Amino acid sequence: MGLFELIPSLVDWAWTFVQPEYELLRLAKKGDHAAVAAYLLQHSTEQVQAAANYIDAAGRSPLVVVCREGHVECLHMMLQHPIFHAMFPAYADGNGNTLLHHACFQGQAEVVRSLVLARIDDDIAFNSKQKIFNSKQFAFSLPCRKKAVAAPVTDVHGFNALASMEFAAVDADGYDSWSHFFVVGAHRHNSPGRSLALRPPPHEAVALAAPSAPSMESIHFEEVVKPAVAPPPPSGDECVVCFDGPIEAVCVPCGHHVMCMDCANAVMGAGGECPVCRATLCQVIKLFRA
């Protein structure tokens, strides 16, 4: 390395003494994932959060740098830390570009793949507020439901039943514990369900299962197979949902005529399944009788 190439590196290193939070950005530019991991382990929650929010003259943070430069190992190390894990899902720079945008701009295919696989829709925001008055150094907020006995709030009250509530830890250790609980713990709790749903059945179960179709020798092709008939709709003039209102609505496309309009609108808002045959409804039509 020549003298002229050494001077920028020395200036870059010296700047960390002026602004210590710049150190993580400097390591991210180099792509040294071992040094990034050591930095995250050796520094406190406040120091890591200051480093995560540091922006250089080009408007780039450590997360943006590793995505643009294609440092996948550094990205994995950062996302394992609760601070970066919490800010990752909703992260955007001053121009509204997300980490996925930056990776796509630079053609970093491996980074794009890692970002898509790691994307978790967290509604938890870890935002420590440093102010002269009413400073909240270890604050975090998350959506909650009101479960008071007098006036509870549930999903029945609408889609906006959740309200953001702010909490705060007593110290940095408590803040780190709560961050780990909400981010890492919740992710581990949800992971087995996803992997279990995508896991194919074991070969033994498939081998031992009895065949569900008849043998070819027992099939007579000249026979006419009658299609299965759907169960008849309930008779009567009262709604099968509330048992009170008059039957007015027709389910489309199945055609069942068993609900009042109030219940039909409620069913459409709750998922849109016919109460008789469980078919997915496109719409409900009010039937006017002469």
Image: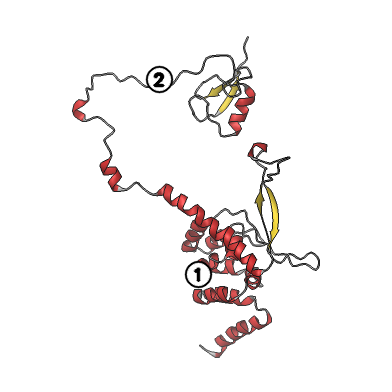
Q: Secondary structure at mark 1?
A: loop
Mark 2 neighbour class, 10 Å CA radius: few under 14, some 14 to 19, many 20 or more: few
Vertical side of 184 occupied by 277: above or below: above
- Image coordinates for residue 288, horizontal then vertical, percent: 62, 15
User: Where is mark 1, residue-wise?
Assistant: 71
Q: Amino acid at mark 2?
A: Val
Can you see residue 200? Answer: yes
Q: Which mark is residue 218?
A: none
| Foreground of the two, 1 or 248 | 248
Looking at the image, tell me whether mark 2 or mark 1 is earlier in sequence order: 1
CB within 8 Å, label 2 to label 1: no
Q: Residue at x 62, y 71 (%)?
A: 48
Q: Is residue 234 left or right of residue 221?
A: right
* Image quarter of residue 161: top right
- Image coordinates for residue 130, horizontal then vertical, percent: 74, 67
Q: Is residue 267 left or right of residue 228?
A: right
Q: Residue at x 46, y 53 (%)?
A: 192
Choose mark 2 or mark 1, whichever is in front. Answer: 2
Q: Amino acid at mark 1?
A: His
